[in-house]
Image (cartoon, grey):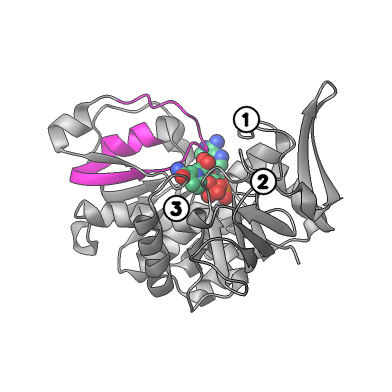
Amino acid sequence: MFKAILIDKDDSGYHARQTDLDDDRLPAGDVTVKVGWSTLNYKDGLAITGKSPVVRSFPMVPGIDLAGVVESSEHADWKPGDRVVLNGWGVGEVHWGGLAGKARLKGDWLVPLASPFTLRQAAAIGTAGYTAMLCVLALERHGVTPDKGEVLVTGAAGGVGSVAVAVLAKLGYRVVALTGRPEEADYLTRLGAADIMDRAPFAEPGKPLAKERWAGAVDVVGGQTLANICAQMKYRGTVAACGLAGGMSLPATVAPFILRGVTLAGVDSVMCPRPDRLEAWQRLGRDLDPALLDELTTEIGFDEVIPTAARILEGKVRGRVVVPVN
Ligand code: NDP
């Protein structure tokens, strides 16, 4: 038996509960992993609360991330004892995920956990951190270098934002952190933010083109905020857009794209091809200071997962949340 969070949907509604499960309930897959650590991402918050139709098959074990050790394998690449990480691929949405003592998965989805990370640190990075690195890689691919000017990070005190601030600052960028939590200014400064801005004005309708300010941006908010950021980009600047914490819409005009050559680079972590994942994890090993990773990580107990899921959607969780599972 192993413990798990289990989501059910039936005539009486949508429920998430903590329970114990038997190995023979695990789904099909060629690798069984003993989960060491899982995490809570914004998407896990949506799944556990049912606020958005993230879960598409019931019952479901949520958890889009896990870090653990292979227990058994029929896949040529993996053997018992291997340390692995899993992010995305629909795990926690259509295939049972990481918020359980064990997970049975497709070996093709797994990434080897290379040094220098511990299982806890890999979970702390999780989908949020690996997505932050995909955003940094997108900026680099479009020629955004520290000498080009300031970069803006939105949702800065959240998971993706915190890692993006830490990595970009370490790479030498002048990072401006956009947040709705002025009380986290010291935290964001410790991560490396050179300046902090209030997110409220960015949520107001703005001009199609505003004063040029940002060489690059990492945006997790979407909506009006993303539209205003596009309008403020410097000539040939790039925005890496990965989130919708402020809304799904994009009330923008084409002006920044056709008059300033701005690039809007979409970032998806779920189906991201394996070579890009490996590159992102390798770069995290080089460009994320482990001391800052510890600074942005909070540990919660397994019995706190369900209440914390609601808090993450309210924007009340700082940085990354890790959950010891075994
Ligand atoms: P978190 O909840 O940890 O962080 C989100 C942050 O966004 C909050 O901490 C808050 O930051 C800010 N925020 C919250 N609500 C609003 C709002 N209404 N308006 C403006 N800002 C808001 O989530 P994650 O970092 O895990 O994920 C961030 C976003 O990125 C989510 O939308 C998630 O779905 C998406 N995502 C997408 C991925 C992909 O593959 N494309 C992968 C991972 C995440 P502050 O208090 O500092 O303002």
Say if residue 157 shows up in the picture: no
Picture disc at residue 125: none
The structure residue drawn at horizontal position 64% and vertical position 57%, both measured from the top left corner, is: 39
The amino acid at mark 1 is Ser
What residue sits right under mark 2 in the picture?
96
Quadrant including the N terminus = bottom right
Asked if residue 64 is positioned above or below residue 57 in the image, the reply reads below
User: 110 or 188: nearer the eye?
Assistant: 110
The amino acid at mark 3 is Thr
The residue segment tinted magenta is: 226-252
Is residue 283 one of those drawn in magenta? no
Q: Residue furthest bottom?
A: 116
- Counting residues from the start of the chain, the first of labels 2 and 3 encountered is 2
Picture disc at residue 52: 1
Asked if residue 59 is positioned above or below residue 13 in the image, the reply reads below
Q: Are marks 2 and 1 in contact (CB under 8 Å)?
A: no
Residue 143 in the figure: left or right of residue 63: left
> The residue tagged with tag 3: helix, strand or loop?
helix
Q: Position of residue 314 (x, y in %)?
A: 65, 41
Q: Are marks 3 and 1 in contact (CB under 8 Å)?
A: no
Look at discs 2 and 3 and give the one toward the viewer: 2
Q: Residue furthest top?
A: 11
What residue sits right under mark 3 in the picture?
131
Give the quarter of the image for residue 249: top left
Q: Is mark 3 within 8 Å of ligand 1?
A: yes
- Counting residues from the start of the chain, the first of labels 3 and 1 encountered is 1
Quadrant including the C terminus = bottom right
